[in-house]
Amino acid sequence: MKNRTFVFLFLLLMTLAACGRSGAIETSVPPRPAGQEDVIGLTVPAMDTVRIGVVGLGMRGSGAVRRFCYIPGAKVTALCDLRQEAVDRGQQTWTKYGNTPAREYAGSADAWKQLCEQEDIDLVYICTDWLTHTPIALYAMECGKHVAIEVPAALDMEQIWALIDKAEQKRLHCMMLENCIYDFFELNTLQMAQDGMFGEIVHAQGAYHHNLDPFWGEYWNNWRLDYNSKHRGDVYPTHGIGPVCQALDIHRGDRMTRLVSMDTKPFNGPKIMEKLTGKPCPDFANGDQTNTLISTQNGKTMLIQHDVMTPRPYDRLYQLVGTDGYAGKYPTKIYCLREEIKEKVDAHHIADEKSYTGEELKALQEGHSSPILTEELEALAKKVGGHGGMDLIMDYRLIYCLRNGLPLDMDVYDLAEWCCLSPLSKLSLENGNRPVEIPDFTRGGWQKVQGFRFSLAE
């Protein structure tokens, strides 16, 4: 497997070099409107209680309502969905824990506008289909509300810049709900990297490999498969790129500068569509596998992959490659270090779940716990769940930062950088795998903060 990865990287690098000689596709950065400033490190007055309106009560939204029942200072004041029965289920969940019933909005395609206009809402939490994420977020911010948007928050460059400008104009938090940065291994490994265990991180890999065969039929009105049928490129990049961008300090001392993408033909997509709908789909756009190689200003690289069409085992291929060490996850957790630390752990004596016991791996990680992961929060996350607990940690951190007047863990520029892979990978693919320049979404502010760190109350 490792040999195949290196061969693939070599081929992509050769393509990037060859295309570079003929020039990369440039992408424009619209000038920042007069009187508008960046929102890097944005803080707002602390809130004792965060009043939340949840829009979209399908798989993700209904789970969020349940998690908010366990988070101090979180109060769901409004619930919205196209379907009244979905709102009813959300209401039952919220009131089951002794909470005051939330107001209900349902029955029309724009019922969410009424929710956004209410004064007793601080945060609009958006869990609808992908096509409506940005319109709802823009309207909510226009109404003075902070927004948290399920992934992907934006689908094209126009939407990305619109969210940035609205957040800057209104001085509001606009965060994407990227849960994978809160997985336990990723949190622990990020801290190990920040503590220098791997030297300087020079390369990182992330992926979303998830056979969605059991889930295609659960998406309302077939919206997710329909989107894949109409759009080429990495349409769901954020789970893979989010954790590695934090490890590489993207827009906190470094920035992504260029990408090049390759994909396979859509072998399985048309078959899945015909099986689900009973109609042939000869023009299915999204390839079964999409691969994107990214370079950074500081001379580092990332490889991001997407595959939801084949029966390969689930993995997010989280890997950090440093000058003095390596960490990886899927199919097993693994560390390799240049120097001996506690145990002999090098290229020929790796620490993984097969050769090491859980206690030995724990000893290797000891002293590098994430500052946000207290024993109480870890226990709560494992009790409540949500993708193994990382959803609970994500929501807890969002409410914690708002209640303490702190910058959020993810800002609107993270949203932009992680979402831009979708339109820019498409641009590369449709132009013969040419490199594409990645714009500076901070408009010059990417070095204002040096190094990613979680904010904590004193």
Image (cartoon, grey):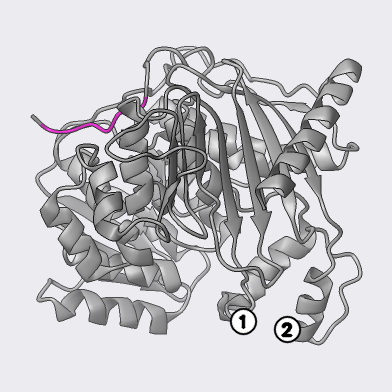
Can you give x and y, in whole percent of width and height, for residue 306 in the image? Answer: 66, 54
Q: Amino acid at mark 2?
A: Leu
Can you give x and y, in whole percent of width and height, for residue 259 in the image? Answer: 71, 31
Q: Residue at x 21, y 42 (%)?
A: 366
Label 2, label 1: how many angstroms apart (C-alpha)? Answer: 7 Å
Q: Is residue 109 above or below residue 359?
A: below
Q: Residue at x 73, y 37 (%)?
A: 9
Identify the magenta region. Answer: 452-457
Q: Which label's residue is closer to the chain start, 2 or 1? A: 1
Q: Amino acid at mark 1?
A: Gly
Of 1 and 166, nearer the camera is 1
Of 45 and 105, nearer the camera is 45
Q: Helix, strand, or loop for circle 1?
A: helix
Magenta stretch containing residue 453, yes or no?
yes
Q: Is residue 293 visible?
A: yes
* Dots 2, 1 in contact, CB < 8 A: yes
Residue named by callout 2: 276
Residue named by callout 1: 217
Instruction: Sort mark 1 into few (<14), some (14-19) or many (20+) by Cα contacts within 10 Å.
Output: some
Can you give x and y, in whole percent of width and height, for residue 86 in the image? Answer: 40, 79
Can you give x and y, in whole percent of width and height, for residue 133 in the image? Answer: 52, 53
Q: Helix, strand, or loop for circle 2?
A: helix
Q: Is residue 47 above or below residue 223?
A: above
Secondary structure mostly seen in magenta is loop
Of 257 and 157, nearer the camera is 257
Q: Is residue 168 above or below residue 90?
A: above
Q: Residue at x 28, y 64 (%)?
A: 78
Left or right placement of residue 131 versus residue 137 in this view = right
Left or right placement of residue 113 versus residue 145 in this view = right
Magenta stretch containing residue 62, yes or no?
no
